[in-house]
Structure formats: C-alpha cells, structure tokens
Amino acid sequence: MGSVYEKNTLRLSLRLSPETYLQIQVVKFATMEINNNSDILPNVTLGFQVYDSCSMLQRELEGTLYMLTGQSKAIPNFQCQRKEKLAAIIGHSTSTFSILMAHILGLSRYPQISHFSTSSLLSDRTQFTSFFRTVPSDAYQSKGLAKLVLNFGWTWVGLVAVANDYGQQGIQVIKQEILKYGACIEFTVYIQLNQPNHNIPQIVQVIKGSTAQAIVVFSTDVNFFSLLDELLKENITEKIWVASEAWSTSSLLTSEKYSKLLAGTIGFAFYSGNIPGLKKHLDQVNPPELPEWPWNWMFWEESVGCTFLNFENVSFPHERPSRNCTEEDKVETFQMYLKGISSLRIVYNLYSAVYVVAKALHELSVCRPGNGPFVNRSCSDVWNFKPWQILHYMKNVRVKLSSGQEMFFNANGDPSPMYDIVNWRLTSAGSINHILVGQYDTTALRINTSTLKWTRDSQKIPTSVCSESCPPGFRKAAIMGKPHCCFQCILCPMGEITNQSDFVECFKCPWDQWPSQQKDRCIPKLTEYLSYDETLGVILLSTGITSSMIPVAILGILVHHKTTPIVRANNYTVSCLLLISMSLCFLSSLAFIGYPTWEKCLLRQVTFGLVFAFCVSCILAKTLMVMTAFKATKPNSDIKKWATPAFSYTVIGLGTFFQLIICAVWLSLSPPFPVYNPNIKAEVLIAECDEGSLTAFWCTIGYLSLLALASFVVAFLARQLPASFNEVKFITFSMLAFLSVWISYIPASLSTSGKYTVAMEIFAILSSSWSMLCFMFVPKCYIILFHPSMNSRKHLLGKN
C-alpha cells in the first residue's frame, strides 16, 4: 500500500547489478500480480518504494528514518506521509544492516521482513519484536551442514568463515554439532574483512598443510574471492568444499577460472520454488515502456551502451555512453542472462515476502467489528491502521503461494526451514552448473547420491578422515596428543575379535568358539579327541585288539597241553582265569578311544579298574598258592589246609570285590562325565571325560598298585624256593614291570594334555598287560612249543 517512490533528482552511488535489477522486477511483478487478483485486497492498490543503502550503514540508517517519516528528510517520531500508508518494510538482505533496521523499527513496532538476512541473532524476540524473514535462520543451516558433513563420513574437517556476525555465529554452531556427533575439527580460520590481503596467505598455508579433505566455508561469495585466488596460486585443487547458502549458488564463482578448484562442491541453498509467469514478465521488460524510473534507465544505458535523451536531473558516478538510444535497441545478452538467473533463489524469498505483507493487509481489511483481535474485539481500518496492528496479523499470517508452498512464521518470526542441496557440476565448456541433488528440513536430510559428482568428475564419495577406518579384526588405539579422530589400528589379541569397523575394544569369543583367521567373527572351535580315524587312534586300536588275541592263543595252548607237567604245576585253573583277564585288560583300552560319550565316560575307568583288579588278584592268588604249597610240604605244617583251590578263588574274589566297592562308591557319589575342556588349547575344544572325583580315580589306581605290590612282596620273599617253584621269579619281574609302568604314568600323564593323556593311559594299560603276559607265560609257552623235552616231571623237580 502506498506509491512507487519517485523523485526528479536521484544520486546513485554504485552501478546497478543484474541481480539487484532482477529483484526490483520481482517486487514489481508480485505487486502487479496482487493488484490484479480480486481475491486479495480488492479495491486496494498495493505499491512499493525502493531505497538504496549503497552498502553503507550510515545510508541504511538514513533510509530507515526516511521511510518512517515519509519524506526525504528524517524527522524522528513524526509521520509526515498522509496520502500513502506505510504497511511494512522488506529488507535488508545483509544481516548486519537488518539488525540496525530492526532496532529502529522495533521501537515503533513497524513490521520488517527480510528476504536474505539469516543471522540467528535476529530470532531473538526480546530484541527484535517486529522482525520477520522468509529465509531460515543460520542456526538451521549450520546444523544441516554439520549433518551433511557427517552423512558422507567426513570426520576430519576444516572450517573457514568470514569474520563477521554471519560467519562467526554460523561456523560456531557447525563446530558444536560436528563435535557433538564425534567428528573432529582440524582447524578453524576466519577471513578478516579489515585485512584480507594480510590474512588470506596465512589461511591458505593452513589449508595447504592440513590433511582434511572436506572444508566448510561459511562466507559470502565476495569475501571468498581473494581466498580462491590465493588457492589457485598455490595449486590447491583436491579439496572438497562445503558451501553455505551465501555462495552455494553464486554466479560470480561459476567461471572457468575457478572450475578446477570448485568442481564437486556441495552445499545448501535456499529452497527454489517456482514463480509462475515471472519469465514471461522478464521477457517483456523494455526500456521505452518505463521511462519514468531513473534506476531502470540507468541499468539499460549501462547494459545497452547508449543514452536516453530524456534522462535528466540524474547525477551519474561514471561517464554516460555517447550514443543515443533508439527504439530498436535490445539487450539480447541481458535477456539471455535473465533466463539463466530467473531461478535465483533469493527472488523466490522476495516474492514470498511481498505476498506475506499483502496477506496480512488483506486479513486486516476483512476484519469485522465484534470479531476483531484488539481491545473490545475491535478491528482496524485498512486506510488508517497503526504499525502494531498490522504486526499482529503478520505474526499469524499463512500464505498459500502460487507455487503450492505455504508460508508462515514461528514464534521467533522464522519460516519453516527448507533447503535445497546443490552440487557443482563441471560442464563440457569448462564452467560450473548448480545441480539439485537433495533437500534438507528439520525432519530429514535427503540426498540422491547417484547424481553426485566430485572432483575429476568422480562419483566415488571422497574421504576426509584423520586416520583410515579400522577394519573388523582391529581396534582403535588413541595417539597421544592427537584428537580422538586420529588413532592407530591394533590387531585384536588372541581369542578376541571385532565384527565391525572402528571398535575401541575387542571382545572375547564364547568359550566354545574361536576367532576366524581375519578375527572378524567367532567360529565354532574344532573338537579334539582320540579318534578312530587318526593315525594314533588306529595304531592303539589295532594294538589293543591284536594284543587281546595273544592271551586267548596262549589259553588255547594251555588247554591243549593241560595234562603236561608244566601246566599242571602252575595252577591250571588260575592260569586260565589270568589269561582271560589279561585279554580283557587289553580290550579295556579300546574304551578310551573314540568320542567320549556319557556311557563311555561312566564305564571306561570302572572297567579298567575291575579288569586289572581281577588280573592282579589272580597273580596274587598264584603267588600265595606257590608260597603255601611249599610251606605245606614241611612236616607238622598248619598251612597245608590253605593250599586248596578254594583259597585261590577266595583271594581272587576278595581282591576284585574291594575294587568293585571303590568303583560303586565312585559311581554313586561323583561319577565321570563328558566335558569340553577349553583351557588346554585356546583354539580347540578338548572332548574328554571328567573323572568326577580324582580321589576315587587315584584310589582305583592306588588299589591296583597295592595288589601288585603285595604280589611283588610275596613273590620276592619266595625267591629262595627250589627250582621247581621258580614261577615266583617271573611273578616278581612281572609285578616289578607293572609297578614301574604305572609309577611312570603319573608324571607322564601330568605332563601331557588332551588326547595325549588318554593315549598315555592306553599305553600304560597295554604296557603293563604285556609285561605280565610276557614274564608269566612266554617262558612256559617257549618250553611247551620248542622244548617239549623240558616239559617233564623229572625236569621240573630238577633231577638228572
């Protein structure tokens, strides 16, 4: 509401850039569109005034006061404009200028809406009560840029910012967010605006000496120029630049000069909504149609290169063209430029700002007394309202734009944040295109990674880390004096793994599993036991079976020659029992071979103990019979009554019975059971039998030793008997060998483990059995088979 700002004399301090000219055209287009729309502000004509601050804070302050006063002279606290009503002020595009304006406009509660000021300071409602903006706060952008960096796994980054409110506040939020999520900052440097030439070389040296590949730049394109030029001099072209919105879509940086340096850049840009009809409007722009606008004339004179004759009373800061303009003059190059720049994101925010003001005025105009928001439910007059009244409607405005997007403000005067993510793509001509590759809002970061192109036109995501990721099987170890992102990878110790990358600690496998060769997973341990399939198992099995046949063969010889003197003289019945027990002794070793099942563990030691007790009891019975038989031949001997077969059977029975009692108690209280032993070999599970009670086990072995020792002692005492009773000598040697084997077994079993302990016990069983068999029966068989002449009563009695 109001009129276009006109003045016959105007001094323009700088040339009008195409971007600025385009923004003016967008404001004009939006105003015309609203005025032609009967659904918004009917019967009311919306106008606008344009002020140029010339990028000077003093001029901005002066212009703000002009707008409040309503004339070219600033008169604080007075409103001199009567005809046109000032509804709101759109601007400034720079945060520092907007802050100055907001302080002044807030005193009068005049609505101010910026289309480009992004400083997070402006969200402080306690200071800036009447400030709004159609662009998100830098707080959202900074958090989003941090997420963008982390999304690509860049944990080692550098930060560059311009040394003003925009850069310092933005980069600090990025730094906090990056550190919060565990990434690290290698360096943070600021472009000093008061000494760019002295500060830039130092920044470049920092970048050159850094190992971070990803560098976030929170700056405007103008302030970034000098740094880029210095980087080109140093030929630093392999960095990945992450751009803030202030330069992410800059047309000034897309020239071929910087393409080698900036290709692959990724960054945030303001949401690019569509403005229907804008391109058509721009195509129709022509200088003769708007001769009354001095800034329009100035721009076209500079663009076309000719002078408008009726352009008077305007002071130029530069020399005007000498040629006069004609009706046929066209600016084809500018029209081409406008077609490329019409999607400039800033103009969408400017377009939205105009509609926000218009919508607020419309809501004010349709208010009905009695339903109003003010005192006594009153309304305001669209032709005579107070600044605070239009401010009320601005806070609650919701505008449905022609692009389909809805614009509204939160409690801080900020819009719902939405950013485009753009990627700088190198064209065949050597210039740069800005390609839309994703979007970001407060809910998610969405990127189409398949469309991304990085340096050298590569689609592989570059890395920016201090240390390469530790693969599975390794753990991260901190490096003294370095950030936690810098580490060394150490192989997991024996028995431990990491199944994912970058684990700080390795963890142990379960007791029944062992790390794979790469130490990235746990696999079941190999099970080891004395198997029938391995060489050692086959040898022991064959030996046990073969050995068990020898006593049977000898038994056959004794049965065949049972009437011969040598057989009859050596207690035939007990000898037969002894040979049967010896065969069983050999066979008992077989129970120790194969997988240790519950039944096998329960019976193998018991079987071994009983069979050997029976065998040694037979030997003890033979020895006692020899002793009693000799003593019984003496006159008046009382021992004669003991020299009977019943006595032998009693000795054998009692000897075996006591072992049976020991085994029964063992099985009742703490029987053997199968277990997996993980302690012998770290990478192997030993399948073995836990004896349950070691005391019972050693009692069994000890009892056998006691029987053998008794046989040895008795045989040793009977060593002086006549030659006809020389069997005691063989018993003595057999028991001596038996005891030697089992005494040697004790340290041998303690020094071995796993299946070799089992093999050692089998070896002891076979050895002790063979020692008894050889010493007691081989000499007799030798005489029976090879010297039958010696198998006579006369020879046994030692007579010539």
Image (spheres, rainbow, N blue to C red):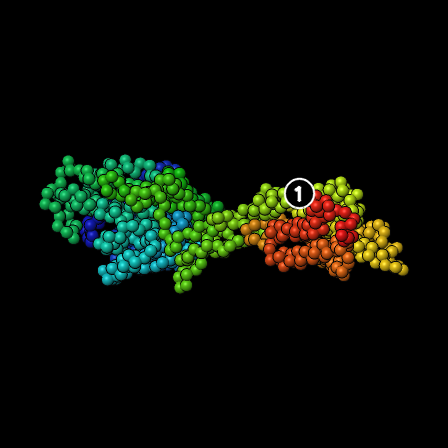
Name the residue: 67% across, 45% down. Answer: 547
Q: Residue lying furthest left in this view?
A: 322
Name the residue: 27% across, 50% down. Answer: 237
Res 311 visible: yes
The one of 567 and 159 positioned closer to us in this rendering: 567
As drawn, is 397 to the left or to the right of 241?
A: right
Res 386 visible: no
As drawn, is 728 to the left or to the right of 304?
A: right
Q: Residue lying furthest front in this view?
A: 800
Residue 341 at what x, y percent from top left?
A: 27, 42
Q: Is residue 271 above or below residue 120?
A: above
Q: Residue lying furthest bottom in this view?
A: 481
Residue 268 at what x, y percent from top left?
A: 35, 47
As drawn, is 665 to the left or to the right of 764?
A: right
Q: How many marks?
A: 1
Mark 1 is surrounded, within 10 Å at the Cα level, by few (under 14), some (14 to 19) or many (20 or more) other residues, namely some
Name the residue: 62% across, 50% down. Answer: 759
Quarter of the rendering containing residue 103? bottom left
Residue 342 at what x, y percent from top left?
A: 28, 41
Residue 716 at what x, y percent from top left?
A: 74, 60
The one of 478 and 227 positioned closer to us in this rendering: 478
The one of 87 and 786 positioned closer to us in this rendering: 786
Residue type indicated by callout 1: Ile
Name the residue: 71% across, 42% down. Answer: 553
Q: Can you identify the residue that label 1 sits on?
A: 545
The one of 317 and 272 positioned closer to us in this rendering: 272
Element on which disc 1 rests: helix
